[in-house]
Amino acid sequence: MSEDTKDIAIESDHINPDPFCPVRLTPIRNRGRVTDKYMIELQRPDSPEWADIAGVRAVHTANYRLVTNQQVHSMAAGVMAQTGMTFKPVHTWGQGHSKSLLWNGRHYLERWYTPDVKVATPHGSEIMLGLEVRNSYDGACKVGLAFFAMHCACSNQFYGDNILGQPYNFSHIGQSGELTGDIEGALGELQGKAEAFGRIVPTMRALTEARVESLEDFLVLRRKMTVTTGLEFRDRQILDELDGHGITSKLGIVVGKAYGPPDSLWALANAFTAVMTHAVGGLRGQDQSGRAVDFLVTEAKERLAA
């Protein structure tokens, strides 16, 4: 196992717990004949044996271009180095969902943040620019970059199109999975996000100024969010977080100073992202965080405009 994999958050059983282990495409045979379908195999740890990833989503056609996790990691490292900015792995909190590298044997995520690009929150903490690289061997996600705003008080990761735009997917993949054609585009995306990062300040201000006026208003908001986004509200976890006794407080962080008044949509956005980051994690947590934040940003703007 590589040195980088010691702090990986494990989500499920693995053929190999090292996300950078050897991987290959192997033709599928039917009655001894080679077909036009391919399966992905990973090499078992400390063994010459290979094993295929189970499931139909890990079966690919001849047009599929295998991009390894190691290629994605190396490309991200090169792009970050070219920016001249300092990038650090996201902080590790709790049970591992907020670790900098996650690998479940099928898909890989790795996250960094840069203290060189930051803005102050309305309550004196800091939000920094985060970068995520992603890859999957079963089609769970496209190989590419995603950007998030990280609340450094608790490592909450704010995804969402209304925050930093849509992910940047790599499209120029060579016959052997090379990503060289995407380096310039990825570098431009990262530099552009850094230059425009200050634009999240009005968004944070809107979330802070938009308030829940009563219990009835809260229930209406809760119902609207559930219907609009399809998300489970996770009442107990969210309310405990807003009350200062949730998952973030268990990490030793005083949320009142970071979230401000609990009746603001800023506090609610932080509570949602805390649960999605630390209790759910992975692609699922990221998706749910993005949907919640996008809804709350839109809701805040509508309330302030009314």
Image (spheres, rainbow, N blue to C red):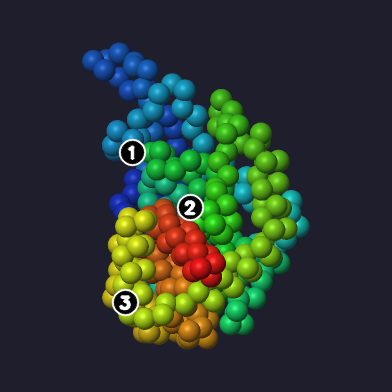
Q: Position of residue 221 (x, y in %)?
A: 36, 68
Q: Quadrant of residue 271?
A: bottom left
Label 3 near label 2: C-beta < 8 Å?
A: no
* Distance CA(mark 3)–CA(mark 1): 49 Å
SS assignment at label 2: strand
Q: Which residue is mark 1?
A: 53
Q: Residue at x 57, y 52 (%)?
A: 165
The spot of residue 107 in percent (x, y) is 42, 47
* Residue 216: mark in rendering: 3
Tell which circle, 2 or 1, labels the residue nearer the N-terminal end.
1
| Residue 168 occupies quadrant | top right
Q: Amino acid at mark 1?
A: Ile
Tell me the kind of residue under disc 3. Glu
Point out the tag, 3 or 1, that comes first from the N-terminus: 1
104 with respect to 269 (left or right)? left
Residue at image position (41%, 80%) is 213
| Disc 2: which residue | 109
Towards the viewer: 282 or 104: 282
